[in-house]
Amino acid sequence: MIKDWKILSSQKTNSLDDIIKIILKNRGLSSSKEISQFINPPHPKDLTLSDFQIDKQEVQKAITRIKEAKSKKESVVVYTDYDADGVCGGTIIWEILHKMGLQVMPYIPDRVEEGYGLSIKGIDKIIKEFDPGLIITVDHGITGSEKIDYAKKKGIDTIVIDHHVLSKSPPLKHKAHSIIHTTKLAATGVAWVFARQLHPQGIESYLDLVALATVADLVPLIGPNRSLVKFGLEKIRNTKRIGLKALIETAGIDQSRIGVHEIGHILAPRLNAMGRLFHALDSMRLLCTPDEDRAVELAQKLNRTNKERQVLTQDTVSHAHNLYLSSQNNKKLIFIAHETYNQGIIGLVAGKLVESYYRPAIVISKGEIYSKASARSINGFNIIETIRTASEFLVDSGGHPMAAGFTVKTEFIEIIQKKLEDIVEEKLTPDLLTNTLKADCILDNNFLKTEIYRGLQILEPFGMGNPPPLFITRSLKINDIRLIGRDNKHLKLFLDIDGKNIEAVGWNFGRFYPDLLKNKFVDIAFTLKENHWNGQTNLQLNIEDVKIPERQQRQ
């Protein structure tokens, strides 16, 4: 996919301070107060409910109901989602209630048998097994009014802890006992804030799970999330949680250096793998276990399952690519359905299609009667809003502007496809379909050094909403070039920078190899990184895009 390059600032950089000021301005920060809060975010314990945009009255209602459940010795079920956010949030609520002395059990639905969120089947199952008087949902429930009503008729109250986008109808407030909700945080963040109000003792120790889930769920690292992740990363690097330590060790990560990248690309996929292919309860067991041997056993199981998930994803992505290309469909929406696709990975497949073709993608796992769909979008196009325009044909739907899912009767797939394609054709403008790489500024060769990288760490944590600073440097001489990795998919350049050999690595950039020549020049868009290997620390450029300089093209 050819990208347009847009340089956000043309200001000349003469120092590290200049670079930092440019980046802050590009992030929309100008006043000294905004900059101070960004660089030195307050500790989460010092933030108020209004800072998190959580309703104080709803929190108090939920606390009162939980205390009532304790006094009446009611059984309570924490009914959580099967992804990393749901598992981490469910762990916090279950452990806190357990510490408070409630009769509480966790429940995670089976992805295939019960599907996402509350279900009649799931409610009937927990009634039979636990006979609860109270259900607490985590990472779902905000669109589950019919299921909450069903539970209410069975004599069960429901407290909803969620962060998904509210559905417009039917109204939920009159059915749920209380709703702890904000779209600003991950569900685990919402769970932590509620737990802080419910039982503040030792609550800071749970920030490791909050950081893990916030990064895993791709929540923007701005506002309160900066506080949660910044202080949560400190907790992860020093975590006492036996299962999390086992997972870190099994994954081969240096615990003292864990950052957003290690969470998003190494730890979270392992936690998610169980819920994608089997059952997520083992992920929750890992986070909760006090037994070191059991923790190692579970961490190794998650590791093996993630490898299976990787192979299955690669095969399915390849199949989906071929299906899309053979369809010769030039619609703005990619819409693919197949009966062999595993429900647990269709979201990953949709994401890969968006990366390749830069347009919204919906991938469906077809069933005999019902089919499950997962959608991913591009910047500026609200996919859940689009999906809900076809709500009359859907069994259910939920999600966020950039990622969503729905269930549909298989007989309605073609109708849904036509309706959604028409809406996307109308609403998705050509400018949104332009894949634009936005660089903070041009960086001269003399700034490509370790001191600059380390100075920029003041702006961490980087992630969604606060991406790593992206720079462009032009006309860098290539000293050497190699293909690396399995199937030679990746690219490594050795660049001449002030007489030094600096490595630049482009993941999945092997396709550029024929166009780049030794002793020739290249323009590079990149982020900076420190590479720690064999006891040595070196600066590395992580390639985001490359172009042949115009003067070289004309030769």
Image (spheres, grey):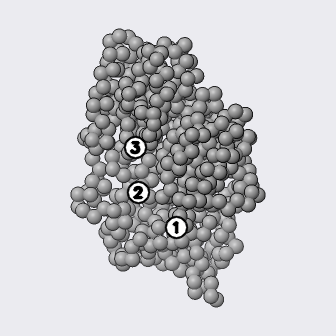
**Residue carrying label 1:** 431
Q: Is residue 180 above or below residue 94?
A: below
The CA distance from mark 3 to mark 2 is 17 Å
Farthest residue toward the top?
72
The answer to the question of whether label 2 and label 1 lie on touching residues, with beta carbons closer than 8 A, is no
Q: Dot 1, crowdedness within 10 Å: few (<14), some or many (≥20)?
A: few
- Kindly identify the amino acid type of the residue bearing the numbered disc 2: Asn
Residue 209 seen by the camera: no
The answer to the question of whether label 1 and label 3 lie on touching residues, with beta carbons closer than 8 A, is no
Q: Dot 2, crowdedness within 10 Å: few (<14), some or many (≥20)?
A: some
Q: Secondary structure at mark 1?
A: loop
The answer to the question of whether label 3 and label 2 lie on touching residues, with beta carbons closer than 8 A, is no
Residue closer to the observer: 323 or 76:
323
**First-in-chain label (3 vs 2):** 3
Nearer to us: label 3 or label 2: 3
322 relative position to 448: left or right: right
**Residue carrying label 3:** 183
Farthest residue toward the right?
326
Q: Is residue 32 above or below residue 404?
A: below
Pick the quarter of the image with the N terminus. Answer: bottom right
**First-in-chain label (1 vs 3):** 3
Q: Which mark is residue 466?
A: 2
Residue 193 seen by the camera: yes
The CA distance from mark 1 to mark 3 is 27 Å
**Residue 256 x/y as whole percent:** 43, 46
**Residue 311 x/y as whole percent:** 69, 45
Q: Residue at x 33, y 20 (%)?
A: 65
Q: Residue at x 30, y 25 (%)?
A: 61
